[in-house]
Amino acid sequence: MSVRTLEIDGKAVTGVAGQSIFSVAWDNGIHIPRLCHVGGVSDVGACRLCMVEVEGQRKLVAACMTPVEEGMVIRTNTEQLLAHRRLIVELLFAERNHICAVCVVNGACELQDLAASLGIDHVRLRYRFPTLSVDTSHERFGLDHNRCVLCSRCIRVCDEVEGAHTWDFSGRGVNSLLISDLGEAWGESESCTSCGKCVQVCPTGALFAKGKMVSEMRKDRRFLKYIVTAREKHEWVR
Amino acid sequence: MAERIIINPVTRIEGHAKISIYLDDSGRVDSAQFHVVEFRGFEKFCQGRPFHEMPGLMSRICGICPVSHILASAKAGDHLLGVQVPPAAEKQRRLVNYAQLLQSHALSFFHLSAPDLLLGFDSPVEKRNVFGLAEKHPETARRGIRLRQFGQRIVELLGGKKIHPAWATPGGVLSAVSTDTRDEILACVPEAIDTLQKALSTMKSIMDTFHDEIEHIGNFPSLFLGTVSREGELEYYNGLIRIVDGEGNIVADGLDPLRYHTFLGEASEEWSFMKFPYYKPLGYPGGMYRVGPLARLNVARWAGTSLADRELREFKQRIRESVCQSFHYHMARLIEMLHAVERIEEIASDAELLDTHVCARAGQNRNEGIGSCEAPRGTLFHHYTVDDHGLIQKANLLIATAQNNLAINKAVEQTARRFVAGNTMTEGMLNRVEAAIRCYDPCLSCSTHAIGQMPLVVELKSSTGDVLSRIERG
């Protein structure tokens, strides 16, 4: 196991070859914002919130997708990066219908927390107000496209941990839509095992447990660490 | 020359409104209209949402009486689930409903109406507000604010926050009440009762000075509609609808709120966003009825609590039949507040309130759910139709202020006839027209969800009904 030494925000840190900048930063108490990353499943670099500056490189890089290298000098918190992150979050708010006040995860939403931590008190872009549906055909869970940020956490956890691959995207760009199986209603999906992992990893209220009212739902992701530890270390411990 | 007097905006009410008064050739008031110029659209944008979200979503209709909307919505949800809520949950819901009645009435009486009543309708406009009241009657203003705080505090203790508490859900409520909460509530009861008894005695002592206003501000016979218990007592959470006429005769009794659409119709007019509900058997607009504090006292035989019953008897003795003067809404609010505090004490003293089984769990068992309760301003109905997956297909809300709409228009017209003469207007005169509306404590933000049209047309009419002039805006 070869070690890499580098500098993040002026702090000398070490990581293992192949480890991502994001992972090394978090191991050292430097919390880079993210929406699509969730520990225990692969990274896809979809949300672009973890973009960082690497000295000597002209372009910003996604911290979750970039392995550490010897001697790297990385900045995670510059004015330019904050401006980028603010714009990304504003774009997410403008793209669909995020009404925190009446959302099931109000007060425990990663998108809401992110906006608050970035000091976003208004959105400078015009809202699109798309007409999107809610799928409550599943007996226990619901999918509200209005609140989906297309992070794909649900797709990855369903595929890589549960092994069902019920979820995927249809369409492209702004027209992308989360679908179960080949576009059937969730309740009619033959591959879904109703395990609920997708609901727990969803960063917003897009996937929710039915019967919950405003601010009632709290997501519990401890199961993921339990499963991943078991898978990687063969230890059934929390 | 025919003329139109516009009062815009109407002050010290919840929301925005405009009044048009039409004068005839001789300068006398010909007709008057109360326009509601806000549009909300709640019935439309809740379509497609899961019904479990409705209490939280509907509570956003209003910041003054969110609890009423939460309760009516949660009750409609209970109906969809087909469950009976646990006793502790029902007690919590009743307790918070009384608390909200208290805070809303305290706001209406002490903050909005007391400046007129205690400082006088003709007192300087810059002083005729809650700050002027605090200057002249500091103790009354302080106690009024404390009383409202008590109501708000109960909502906060049980619901988690004062405004828009996310707490009642289809099937019950989310959390149990602690003994600390109960003790805090009970400790505040004596001061609240004392405040109300003092306010009632002040109100009775000054009542005679408002003879002219009592006689001419919204004094007309109409039907009154309200909820009563099976024994005919005041009831705010779960009862039957009773309708009485202007002479106190029972027109209809024992009506099931779940069948409201069989006896209540809803009309709309182009010049207002607010619906015009009416009692179906008498048609539109003959089926005009009033709801709210005065209506509830008119339909109930007794209050059911000792102090409020004493006041109610005295109130009813003042006028033998039904009380038709809208001005008495103020007195009715004070009596209701006293009753609410007595009930709060009663419920808080009940050990069952502390039970931890507070929510009945069930899946959806029906496609249509109706919930009703008595909101501070009158009877409230929420009616949802959902698909098999629990998504709202159609929502109909029948709000208290909208049910008073016909009566408010009538009151404005009558008041204008008495107090507006010619085209010379005084501030006190205009304020009496506004006061006619304020009697109903209209909550316009609640009541403007009906899909209507913007008041784009302004018409000047002569006494014979001919249109003298027509202006189209925009």
Image (spheres, rainbow, N blue to C red):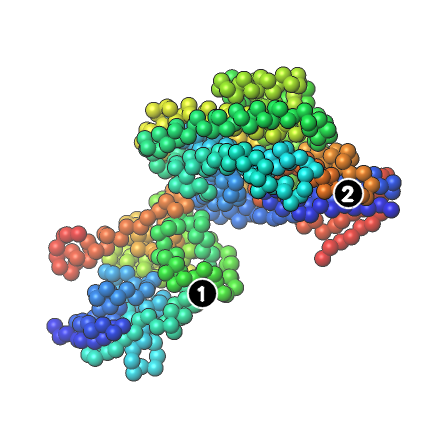
Quick one: SS at disc 1? helix
The relative height of residue A22 versus residue B355 in the rendered view (above or below) is: below
What's the residue at 51%, 43% (across, down)? Answer: B63
Residue B247 in the image: state x and y as whole percent.
68, 19
Left or right, residue B247 beside residue B372? right
Q: Are marks 1 and 2 on the same chain?
A: no
Residue under label 1: A91
Q: To which chain does the residue with label 2 belong?
A: B
Q: To which chain does the residue with label 1 belong?
A: A
Left or right, residue B228 beside residue B272? left
Residue B200 in the image: state x and y as whole percent.
56, 25
The relative height of residue A2 versus residue B394 in the rendered view (above or below) is: below
Residue A57 in the image: state x and y as whole percent.
31, 81
Q: Quadrant of residue B180?
A: top left
The relative height of residue A10 versus residue B183 in the rendered view (above or below) is: below
Q: Nearer the viewer, mark 1 or mark 2?
A: 2
Residue type at tag 2:
Met
Q: Is residue A178 visible?
A: no
Question: Is the residue marked by circle 1 packed among few (<14), some (14-19), or many (20+) residues within 10 Å?
Answer: some
Quick one: SS at disc 2? loop
Residue B259 in the image: state x and y as whole percent.
56, 29
Q: CA distance from mark 1 to mark 2?
A: 53 Å
Residue under label 2: B425
What's the residue at 19%, 58% (across, down)? Answer: A228
